Image (cartoon, grey):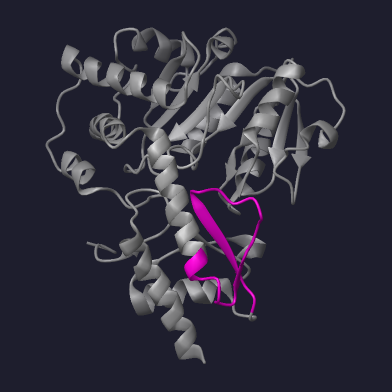
Amino acid sequence: MIYENYYIFTPGPVKMSDEILAVGAKQTPYFRNQEFSDVTFNCEKGLLEMVNAPSGSKVIFLTASGTAGMESVVTNLLTKDDNALVVHGGGFGGRFVDICAIHDIPHFDFKVKDTNLSDIETLSPNGNFTSLIVNAHETSVGHIYDLDSMGSFAKKNDLLFIVDAISMLVTDPIDMSKQNIDVVIASSQKGLALPPGLTMVILAPTALAKVQDVKNMYFNFKDYLRNGERGQTPYTPAVTIMLQLEARLAQIKRDGGVKKSIKKAKKIAKYFRKKIKKLPLKAFTPFMPNAMTTLTPTDGKSAMDIVNSLEEGYKVMVCPNGGELQDTIFRVSHMGDMTKEYTDVLIDALHDYYRKDV
């Protein structure tokens, strides 16, 4: 199998545990029955607990990538009467801007740099906004925003607060109730450490009240909510990934809960950063999450060359960046079934790579 024997440090897909892999190896069962409805209900309950969703919140399960979750939230919750304040600090923030533009949703392209938006009160542009949209962890550059400050700002200004938490769930704190979050978008292949193909949209009652009638068959939230009452989806769900999600949520709970998982990711991230401190690499941003470390070479090397050398010479896969940053940064994931021993493989490879270059 392609890349089967490689060590994987990419921010999605991420390293999966043997327990979850074993669930995926089983025959996919039939799903239009009570047994699978119970699986759906279990997944919904576990996710709502994980993000401390307000009472009455619901989860929509989409057989699709994270971008589908982003687009479906915009089309089902916002209209031409809205005015969205869209945080644009990288490629995924830019994607939200593009989605709003494609669907003719009035919006402001709030370009930010070198801030975690703890100062959003002073940085925010003037405008009669109705919603605040952010990729909580801007995965394209490994930059995390201050959801506490943003949530306070949203509440103060009566904004619908939409948060893409795809690459921070399980590794970095998020609390819908505490942070006044109305919508959380999650996906299977990052912090949850599952295969790609399943996206979850968590809607607080404030967001449920804004779900509108849309001219869309597949991404019609009202249809999903109706079917969700019986633990089903309108169309074929990602059955096996749902079974893996149920097992993964149980695994997280059995291992001490999401707070312990976050603590573990933080420990691995700190360990990695400490062990490479003497190498000619620096952090690209001072606001890095536990989920990922983004590095810039300080010796003139191309980041892309480092990525290729690790893959070809050590069977270690880290993540390059595209566009104008392809030679400037590379990204290292701490998501998934990570241990110090597994992380040591990358640390040793980086040290050996630089020794050979001397």
Q: Residue at x 20, y 41 (%)?
A: 24
- The answer to whether residue 246 is above or below residue 269 is above
Q: Residue at x 47, y 55 (%)?
A: 269
- The answer to whether residue 87 is above or below residue 272 is above
Query: Looking at this view, is 2 or 170 the one in front?
Result: 170
**Position in image of residue 350 (x %, y %):** 45, 75
Q: Which residues are magenta?
A: 274-298
**Position in image of residue 69 (x %, y %):** 49, 30
Q: Residue at x 45, y 42 (%)?
A: 171
| Magenta-colored stretch includes residue 296 | yes
Q: Is residue 21 visible?
A: yes
Q: Is residue 320 left or right of residue 131?
A: left
Q: Where's the N terminus, which quadrant?
A: bottom left
**Position in image of residue 139 (x %, y %):** 55, 49
Q: Residue furthest left?
A: 27
Quadrant of the image occupied by residue 41: top left
**Position in image of residue 202 (x %, y %):** 47, 22
| Magenta-colored stretch includes residue 235 | no
Q: Is residue 6 left or right of residue 119?
A: left
Q: Residue furthest bottom?
A: 358
Q: Residue at x 29, y 13 (%)?
A: 231
Quadrant of the image occupied by residue 64: top left
The mark tally for this picture is: 0
- The answer to whether residue 60 is above or below residue 287 is above
Query: Looking at this view, is 102 or 313 the one in front?
Result: 313
Q: Is residue 105 visible?
A: no
Q: Is residue 95 left or right of residue 312?
A: right
